[in-house]
Image: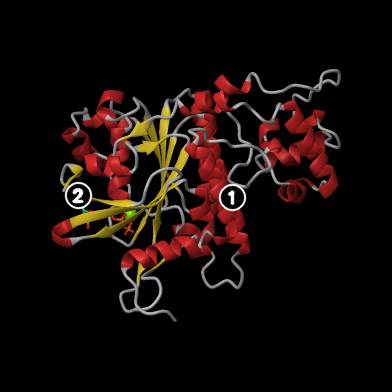
Amino acid sequence: MPKKKTKTEEIQEETQESKEEHVEEKAASKKKEKDTSEAKLPSTSRKATPKPKDSSISKNEASQDEGEPKATKLEDLPGVGPTTADKLREAGYEDLMSIAVAHAGELADCSGLAASAANKAIAAARKAMGMGFITGDEILKKRELIGKISTGCKTFDELIGGGIETQCLFEAFGEFGSGKTQLGHQLAINVQLPVEQGGLNGMAVYLDTENTFRPERIKQIATAAGLDPEKALKNIMVARAYTSDHQMLLAEKIDELIRTKKLPVKLIIVDSTMGLFRAEYAGRGTLAGRQQKLNRHLHTLQKLADVHNLSVYLTNQVMARPGIFFGNPTAAIGGHILAHNSQFRVYLRKGKAGKRIARLIDSPYLPEGEAVFKISADGIEEA
Ligand SMILES: Nc1ncnc2c1ncn2[C@@H]1O[C@H](COP(=O)(O)OP(=O)(O)OP(=O)(O)O)[C@@H](O)[C@H]1O
Ligand SMILES: [Mg+2]
């Protein structure tokens, strides 16, 4: 074992370890970021899985294959009859886009299709969706729509480039009491503020897996932010999840909430992301099943972020292991999967005199750094 390291080195190392598998993907995507275009080109990496896009940019996509009628519903796909289509719908694949971005294995598992047939169905769905390469300026156009939600603390905002961005997953990890839930509450308020005040004039959806959502606290923070506390509460849709499947299902329902009820949801909070997964899979020999489910869950969230131009704030508890002098002081739960899927990762820890330190661990284009903030009766504040 190596000699004792500084905390910073340990955190960096942890991040490093959890990424090795996909260093290349990350490097590639970081390079693209530098060119101010978040190129999410299909088939280059898992992170860059083709995703549903804002209508503003999907129009011009290549539709080279004229002649053949394009599929418009599941039953139009090759090899998919009414029974298979029903099975797919039951499994949550309700439209062509969901098929287009699916994995063949998953599709085969839930529908009974052979893997080759699943691949054909996916290919046809992709064709129908006109998925392919899009030009850099279209990506730029999409990126120009990115909004930012203030954390309530200016230095924290600066650390993360102005606030929590839309179109991406933002993970806060840290031990108990480090402020993950408090930040979630603050963001649920701040998203409601006008843009000039660091908000997005939007609503929040709060997926509560640990029963830590507190309306009283929301009222307190809302009042401090100058909002009507009762109205602020009405702008937060809360769902308590009891199992990881329930949590996944709730996330899938958000799309419907936005589309059918036309709710201006601009922030989804999942607090905590891993708690139920961890509890249910505790002590099992293999984590593969858990990771696969978690991956699907994160894909659902990423899709929502992309399609509806909203922010996703994920919390993840890590255990402090003060007795450990070598290696990591924290054990990230969720392992690689969560780390790879979050474009922003912030490590929160307790500092002296009730202060909290946020450390930016992973961002597509910002340098690592730290910001100090505090939690008061009014919420997240300048330290
Ligand atoms: N009204 C308040 N006024 C001041 N500080 C508060 C208030 N409410 C909570 N806090 C601070 O926030 C801390 C709890 O933070 P929070 O619940 O966000 O932690 P967490 O990271 O979500 O922890 P866990 O992993 O257990 O969920 C408390 O220990 C307290 O210091
Ligand atoms: Mg919490």
Q: Tell me what residue is drawn at x 37 percent, y 30 percent.
A: 203
Side of 246 relative to 82 (left or right): left
Residue denoted by label 2? 375
Q: Which is more N-terminal, label 2 or label 1?
A: 1
Placement of the N terminus among the 4 image quadrants: bottom left
Q: Amino acid at mark 1?
A: Glu
Q: Quadrant of ligand 2?
A: bottom left
Residue 271 at x, y percent in the picture: 39, 50
> CB atoms at circles 1 and 2 under 8 Å apart?
no
Q: Amino acid at mark 2?
A: Ile
Residue 62 at x, y percent in the picture: 71, 23
Mark number, residue 223: none
Which of 315 and 74 lies nearest the eye of the viewer? 315
Residue denoted by label 1? 25
**Marks 1/2: CA–CA distance:** 37 Å
Tell whether circle 2 marks a residue whose Cβ is less than 8 angstroms from ligand 1. Answer: yes
Res 220 quadrant in image: top left
Which of 356 and 86 lies nearest the eye of the viewer? 356
Badge 1 local density, few (<14 within 10 Å), some, or many (20+)?
A: some
Label 1: element kind: helix
Q: Tell me what residue is drawn at x 34 percent, y 59 percent.
A: 174
Residue 77 in sight in this render:
yes
